[in-house]
Amino acid sequence: MTSTDGTFRLTVAQAIVRFLMNQYIEIDGVETRVCGGGFGIFGHGNVPCLGEALYPVQDEMPLYRGQNEQSMGFAAAAYAKYHLRRRFMFCTASAGPGTANLLTASALAHANRLPMLMLCGDTFLTRLPDPVLQQLEHFGNPTLGVNDAFRAVTRYWDRITHPAQIIQSLPAALATLLDPADCGPAFLGLPQDVQGCAHDYPASFFDRRVHRIRRQPPDAAEVAYAAALLRQAKRPMIIAGGGVQYSGAVATLTDFAEAHQIPVVETIAGRANLLDENVLNIGPIGVTGSDSANAIAEEADVILAVGTRLQDFTTGSWTAFAKDAKFIGLNVGRHDAAKHLSLPVVGDARLGLEALGAVLDGYESPTDWTDRAKAERSTWREYVADNVAHGNRPNSYAQAIGVVNALCDKRDRVVAAAGGLPAEVTANWRTLDTGTVDVEFGFSCMGYEIAGGWGARIAQSEREPTADTVVFCGDGSYLLMNSDIYSSVLTQKKMIVLVLDNGGFAVINKLQNNTGNESFNNLIADCPTVPDAFAVDFEAHARAMGADAVTVANPAELGEAFKRAKAADKTCVIVMKVDPYDGWTTQGHTWWEVGTPEVSDNPDVRAKHAEIEADRTKQRQGV
């Protein structure tokens, strides 16, 4: 209620909701509420107070009922990724295991630099009823609880111990969520008694505020040093990461590359920066990359890394490049810009490319180098075309990807995550339009696929309702987390889910075999504790959650089923068995450092260890 002195008498929960309702962001000249709503599962730790506060605004700030707190967090991350980190969702969970379930999702958002606000119940500040339901007691430290575990996987963490604290904490959390350099998840622990405590909040705290993402210009001296290094380059290359999209720098990057005729390779997060048809798009780089990108990476003398954190799958555990190659790190985050002794250019990707372009005016990469890169690209494209073709071959991930790629609309959004599918999508997908691929490999999190697809579809329906969200999911990830098929049907947020069943964790079985080990406990058929293996009826399971579902025998049938799914108005699940051993993309892989046994009774393991260690000589240790 409003008082005569210009304050609002509100509970902490009510004040949090009212504050979020009045925060807007300007996107392309349009002011939109920065918080798109929330995902929630209520329990005793959040339903009496936060539930009461959210009920009156349910039409303006939708609260999606989750089936699992972890999947809610995945959905929120995918929502933020679709909106290029300019909008976010909150997740609310009860005290105890409900909140603990969000830990993995928070780590995923942290690794991927994605905004997500968590509003989670906590034990009573007074401690009078202790120990309470679901409380973890630490005998030597009564302030310690489950919520403290989030300190390691958040960019902003606070426990609200007095109602007035949110006057400082909420704006600080929001600033973190919208900061291009420090972006990541924010966590507010809300003790159950404090949630319901009232306070006289100043009316100005709830004023409508319009936020804008900061664009940090690079330092002129850093730009000059970087430009001087690039001008000397005989074999320059650009690595385009996910930060290119978050900056809105896709067109700028394309113009920069074309103006200076510099070949571009993409990271996993940077897939769909350049269109497939662009002749300077030399392909994805690294462990899940292409022969074309990795071939030129081995010879490049100056590498401009834009908006990438240079994860090991990008760098081939730092074996993908010549040891004397020089790096320029253009990144809004100082930590990422200076990695591996890169010459840092700290600033917004778009402004940084524009500044570099102005100084580099007139410079072009040597023609023989650019022609070499284009020739490598042409050879790789021929390989991919053959790799995705189907006929007298075992069913494979690549074939399924090729079928979908040929039939989808250019604005359809593709979602994949852990297992073998991220590598196969990264290597084989032909980008039809920019910003249409979400391969979550920052945390490589099983279970993200379907939950992330739901979150992506919620976001997509706000801006591109006629486009589809297409989820590639293995049987292992499906069995880990599938309940958001039900969520998508309930909320009428249609997805097309491809369940590609290879009988277990086949990609890890492949790694197991490639390190000299025998198949063990990955494929269901190789589990010693399984006396009688049988296949799951994924079609029946999906139908039980309300989806349309069909099982197909081969890629040709998959194509017909995908056409029907495109025409349908609700979530469709298409199931196809694929071979666990045959049909993997065999080209394009760099070396990847994995731990192998130095001693073993198995001669194959010893041989593989020696082989892997021999390749370590290529590894850069800083130049």
Image (tube, rainbow, N blue to C red):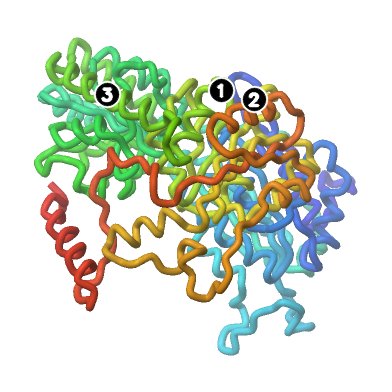
Residue 503 is situated, as x and y percent measured from the top left of the image, at 52, 56
How packed is label 3: few (under 14 Cα within 10 Å), some, or many (20 or more)? many
Disc 1 marks which amino acid?
Leu
Q: Which mark is residue 563?
A: 2
Of residue 213 and residue 236, the one placed in the foreground of this image is: 236
Q: CA distance from mark 1 to mark 3?
A: 23 Å
**Residue with the mark numbered 1:** 407
Q: CA distance from mark 1 to mark 2?
A: 7 Å
Q: Secondary structure at mark 1?
A: helix
Residue 363 is situated, as x and y percent measured from the top left of the image, at 17, 14
CB atoms at circles 3 and 2 under 8 Å apart?
no
Residue 131 is situated, as x and y percent measured from the top left of the image, at 73, 84
Q: Which mark is residue 377?
A: 3
CB atoms at circles 1 and 3 under 8 Å apart?
no
Numbered disc in front, either 3 or 2: 2
Q: Secondary structure at mark 3?
A: helix
Task: Please give left or right for residue 205 compared with residue 114 in the image.
Answer: right
Q: How many marks?
A: 3
Q: CA distance from mark 3 to mark 2?
A: 30 Å
Q: Residue at x 25, y 30 (%)?
A: 292
Relative to 97, say whether 568 is above or below.
above
Task: Please give left or right for residue 259 compared with residue 500 in the image.
Answer: left
